[in-house]
Amino acid sequence: MSQSSNPRPTVHELQRLAREAGRARRRRRPRLSRAARLNLIDAMSRWATSGLALIAGSSIFIAVSASALYPLRAAVWGVMVLAALYLARRLTKDFRAGGRSSARPFRWRANYTATLSVLSAAFGAGALILFPADAPADLGYQSLALMLAAAFGAAFLHAAHGRAALALATPSSAFILLAGLRFSAASGAGAALA
């Protein structure tokens, strides 16, 4: 049997193709300089207060709306969110005022990102804490939509540091999605999805 009648490549040809493919490597983007990263940290610390205010405002509105039906649940969730907001605001205020944390901006960024994750978890947990499965659907869906918009809006305001934005958006979104699935299952819409 001749080589030309065999349409499959030989082992040597495949090895040659693999060597040639290995040469064409993608170029990585250059890493940001230290000065650029410090500039992004400064930008995030400036915009952080607006993101925290968005979370605080929507939390107060949702807690007041839900307190008519579930006052104890609203109080517990309100304390959780306000405690996490206090910690995040205190970190931001200390950094912006030139306190001890401003001498170590990368450590501040790590601490602040961890605090945002706690805030996001407390904020998103409200979707499960505030509204039991038999809660009125209109109040539940309206609050879930507001919570989701506030979480993504606050994450957008923290976009100068991608991990901080993810830390703010991901836990709350997971809780809100879980609560939305619970509402849809309780209202019968979940049976159509399953």
Image (cartoon, rainbow, N blue to C red):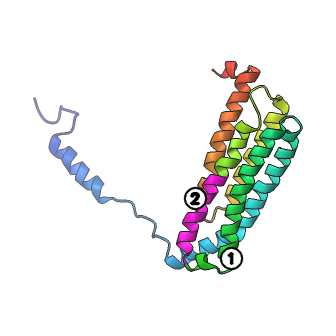
Q: Is residue 94 left or right of residue 24?
A: right
* Amino acid type indicated by mark 2: Ala
Find out whether residue 114 is within the magenta segment.
Answer: yes
Name the image quarter holding the N terminus. Answer: top left
Find out whether residue 188 is within the magenta segment.
Answer: no
Q: CA distance from mark 2 to mark 1?
A: 18 Å
Which SS class for mark 1? helix
Q: Is residue 160 left or right of residue 139?
A: left
8, above or below 91, in the image: above
Q: Is residue 73 left or right of residue 44?
A: right
Between residue 135 and residue 50, name the one nearer to us. Answer: 135
Q: Which residue is mark 1?
A: 96
Number of labels in the image equals: 2
Choose top left, top right, bottom left or bottom right for residue 126.
top right
Q: Position of residue 15 (x, y in %)?
A: 19, 47
Q: Which residue is mark 2?
A: 114
- Outermost residue toward the left? 1
The mark found on residue 105 in the picture is none
Q: Residue at x 17, y 36 (%)?
A: 4
